[in-house]
Amino acid sequence: MAEIPTDLQAALQGLQRELSQADDPRRHWLAVLERCQAAGLRYPEGADSIAYLARAIPDATARKPDGQALRDRLHRATGALKRWADGLIEERACELYHEHQAAEAERIANLPPPTAAELEAQQRATEAERQARDAAAPFRVLGWDAPRKLIWFQHRETAQISSTKPGPSFERLLPLAPLAYWESAYPVDRRAGGVDWSLAASELAAAADRAGVFDPQRQRGRGVWCDEGRTVWHLGDRLEVDGVETPLAALASRHYYPRLPALAISPAAESLSDTQGQQILQLIERMGWAGPSDHLLLAGWIVLSNVGGALRKRPGLQITSGFGTGKSDTVDNVIRPLQAGLGISCSGSTEAGIRQSIRQDVLPVLVDESEQADGNRREQQLRLVRLAYDGLPLVKGTPGGEALEFTLRVSICLAGINAPISNPADLSRIAVIGRRQLAAADWQQLAAERAELLTLAAGEALIRRTVSHLPTLLANIDTMGRVLGGGRMGDTYGALLAGAYLLVSTAQLSDQEALEWSAGFDPAAPAADEVDRSPAAEARQCLDHLLAHELPWRDPDNDRPSAGRITVGELLELSLRSGGGEAPKALGRCGLKADPELGLLVANSGAAIGKVFSGSKWSQGGHRARLLELEGAEPVKSPPRFPVLGTRRCIAVPWALLEVDPSQLAAAADTQRVLGWGA
C-alpha cells in the first residue's frame, strides 16, 4: 500500500484531534477512522478537503453555527466522507474474503486424504447435525404421496397432519412453520434478512425422500384402537395409552394420530360397576323384545360399538319393528345414552354421506330410516356394514383417474320399519332384533326407571369400563366364538354375547362359563312373538302382498258402472273360471298372467308390476328374488306373451302354493285352448 503523503497525514491528524475532542454525533467519525486503519485503508489524495472538514467541526461545536450555510457545508463534507469510507471498506472486505478462500482451498489441497474412520466420523457428525436440525423444526416430515405430488407433514405442537405441494414459495412453506423459523434456518443475508426459499424447498424435498411414501390410511381418527398390544383411546386433542394420558405426537408407532375436535367425554370418569351393569341389562330385558335373546344382542352391540376400532370383527345390528313399536325409542333412549352421545347419527343417508360423516373415526354409527323401499340406498348401507365387519377398504375412482381408498372399522346399527335382510351373507354378519309393545302400565313404570338409569353419565362409565378391560373383552370374544362353533356365526354372535357379558363381569371366561352364558341361545330360533324371519317366510309375505293388491274393477256382467275394487287373488279365480274376457286383461295390466300349466306368471320388471309393489319392501324389482325363494318357483325359460303387455320375462309361481283346485286348472286349460287365449 502506498505511503500517505505528509500534508495529508497532517490533515488527518488534525481531523482526528478535533474528533477526539468533539461531542456526539462527531464520535461516529472517530469510529470511521479506526475502521479505516484496521482495514489498512487511507483517504484519497485530498488534504484540502480534510483540512476543511477539520475547520468545520470546531465551528459547529465550539460556538453557535453561522447560519444555514455552515450546517450545509458540514453535512456535505461528512456525507461524502462516509460514502467513500463505506465503499472502500466493502471493496477491501471482498478482497480479504477471496484471499481467505484461496488460502483455505490451498490448505485443504495440501492435507492428507481422510482415513475411513475420519470419513465415518464426519458422516456421523453430519447426520447428527441434520437430525438435530430436523428435531428443532416445528414440523415433522412424513413423506411423499404415491404420485410424488404432495409432501405430508405433522405439526409438532398441534399434531395436525396436512400436505403441501413442494416449491420455493412463501405461500407453500409458510403453513409448515412461522416466518421467523424460515428466516433463522435458511437466511439469505443475516444482516439484511430474507429467506432462501429455494434452499428450504430443496431440503424439505430431501427430508421427504428420506421418509419415503406416506400412506394416509395410517392415520387414525377418534375412538379406541389396538396398537401393538397397547390400548389407545384417541380423544381428539390427546391420547390415553394403556390408561396413561399421552400427547398426540408423542406415541412411537407406525400409525399417526392427528389432532381432531375433542370428544365430549372425560376419560377420568368412574368405571361402571358390576351391579350397575347388571341393572342396565335387566332393564333392557324388560323393554319387550321380539326374540328371546334380542336384549343380549342389543346390549352386546352397544358395548362393542364403543371400541369398534380395536375389534377383529364388528357385527352389525338391524332393528326391525312395526310403526310405533319402539324402533326410534330404542335408538334415542337406549343406544345413544349408553354411547355417551358419541355415536354418529345418519338418517336415510347415502353411502357417500355416511363415509363423509365417519372420516377417520371409529365411533359407532346409527343409521335411521333404513328402509327396503329405498332400494339402492338400502343396499349401499348393507354393503358398508359388510365392509366394516371385516375392516376391508372401500376403493372409489376419482375424476382424476386415481383410486381413493377408505377403510371402515366402525360398528353400524341400521333401523327401519320395512328392512328385512334375506341375504345369508348379511344375516351372518348382522344381528336382527325387534321390539314388541308393552302394556301401558308396564311401560310407564319402565320408562321412569330407564330415564334414571340410562343416562349419558352411565354411558361414560360404560365406555370407561370397556376401555379399561379391553384385553379381557377381546379374550372373551375369542372364547365365546369358539364355543359357538367358530366360523362367521361364531365371530358375530360370540362377540355380541361377550359384549353383553362385560356388563355383568370383567372376569375372563373359561370355556365352561362361556357355554353356561350362551346356554339356550340360537340365532336361528323363532322370535318370541312367533314371527318367522326365515327367507321362506319373507317370500310368502311377498306373495301375500301380491295376491292382496287391489285395483278398480267393474263387473262385465253388470251394465251399471260401479266404483268397486277387486284383489289380484280374486282376479285369478275369475281368469281361470272364464278363460278369457276382462279378467286376464286386468291381470296383464298388473304384469301378471294365469297359466293353467305353468302357474301364476309374474313379470320380472316393468311399470305394471312396479305399481303392485310400489311403497313396499319389495319395490324396484325386489319381488323377483323373494318369490324365487318359494318352493317350486322358477324362471320361465321362454318369455311368454302377457295380455295387454306383450312378451315379458317372468317367473312362475306353482298353483300348489295358491291352493287352486286341479280340476279347475284342467278346465281352464281346455277353455284357453279353445279360445286361443294362451297364444
Image (cartoon, rainbow, N blue to C red):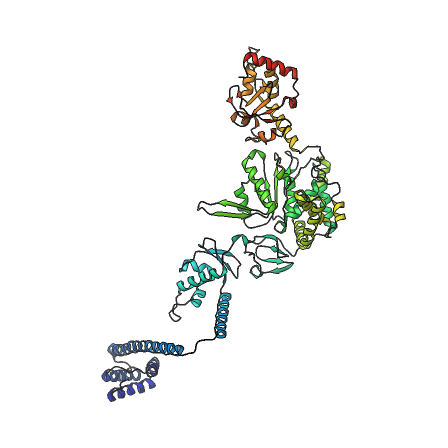
Residue nearest the viewer, comparing 388 with 301: 388
Q: Does residue 533 lie above or below 341 as drawn?
A: above
- Residue 180 on image: x %, y %: 44, 65
Quadrant in which residue 548 is drawn: top right
- Give the position of the N terminus as an image quadrant: bottom left
- Residue 581 on image: x %, y %: 55, 14
Residue nearest the viewer, comparing 445 with 295: 295
> Which residue is painted at 44% across and 63% down in the image?
203
Residue nearest the viewer, comparing 267 with 610: 610
- Residue 405 on image: x %, y %: 52, 48
Q: Does residue 121 lie above or below 538 as drawn?
A: below
Q: Does residue 245 lie above or below 316 as drawn?
A: below
> Which residue is painted at 51% across and 26% down in the image?
607
Res 523 seen here: yes
- Residue 99 on image: x %, y %: 34, 78
Res 555 seen here: no
Q: How many marks?
A: 0
**In the displayed structure, does residue 114 sit left or right of residue 537?**
left
**In the displayed structure, does residue 506 sit left or right of residue 419?**
right
